[in-house]
Image: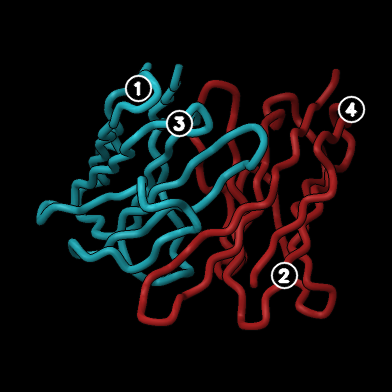
Amino acid sequence: KAGVTQTPRYLIKTRGQQVTLSCSPISGHRSVSWYQQTPGQGLQFLFEYFSETQRNKGNFPGRFSGRQFSNSRSEMNVSTLELGDSALYLCASSLTELSNYGYTFGSGTRLTVV
Amino acid sequence: AQRVTQPEKLLSVFKGAPVELKCNYSYSGSPELFWYVQYSRQRLQLLLRHISRESIKGFTADLNKGETSFHLKKPFAQEEDSAMYYCALSRSLTGGGNKLTFGTGTQLKVEL
């Protein structure tokens, strides 16, 4: 079966612009999480969605937002981009909302802000 | 607050030697612990869940609540084990939902 699909794979944006990233989870998975990966900070939790509801948000400014659709696909939006937003953004999906199940990750979207 | 510590950024071993990647955590509740692996140019993938008590690709990890550790071990390293390994802790949050907290990762390099 298809894995977690993230689009686009690469993005280059200018400071001040906004960007939307997309994630299609594994079919049947209802939990979707987003993570930011940078060399300096490592992997940091952004937010988690389950059945179209954002259940948790990490310690990121309000410029970072997201949503989940009825088909479990999720989008993440970053407004007023800053240079420090340059990172690999990873989406992960899980079959259940149980914390012990584990997540399947996508390949990520590499965002570069210039 | 929960925290995951991987003290080694880089671990270099010879092929056939034992491997131990260290992971310590701090969490007041009952932790759910995982090891994820990222091979070169591949996506992050789940290697082990502590609840499964399984051996994957020869790797095992035992949760030691007394020492708050979840070290990853393999008796004989193979060249294909070279990768970045992340220890992660998951917890259920008030109001529902989960959150994975990752360690900073350990790059394992297996030399011939």
Q: Looking at numbered disc 1 in the image, what kind of residue is underneath it?
A: Arg
Q: Mark 3 lies on which chain?
A: A
Q: Name the residue under label 2.
A: B63
Q: Is mark 3 on a helix, strand or loop?
A: loop
Q: Is residue B8 above or below residue B100?
A: above
Residue B111 position in % (x across, y down): 84, 21
Question: Who's the residue at 58% across and 58% down the image?
Answer: B101
Q: Mark 1 points at which residue?
A: A9
**Image-quadrant location for residue B55:** bottom right
Give me the C-alpha separation between circle 3 and circle 1: 19 Å
Q: Which chain carries label 2?
A: B
Give me the C-alpha separation between circle 2 and circle 4: 26 Å
Q: Which chain is cyan?
A: A
Asked if the residue at tag 1 contacts the one at tag 4, i.e. Cβ–Cβ closer than 8 Å, the answer is no
Checking the image for residue B74, the label placed there is none
Q: Name the residue under label 4.
A: B14
Please indicate whether residue A9 sits to the left or right of residue B91 in the image.
left
The quarter of the picture where the N terminus of chain A appears is top left
Does mark 3 fall on the same chain as mark 4?
A: no
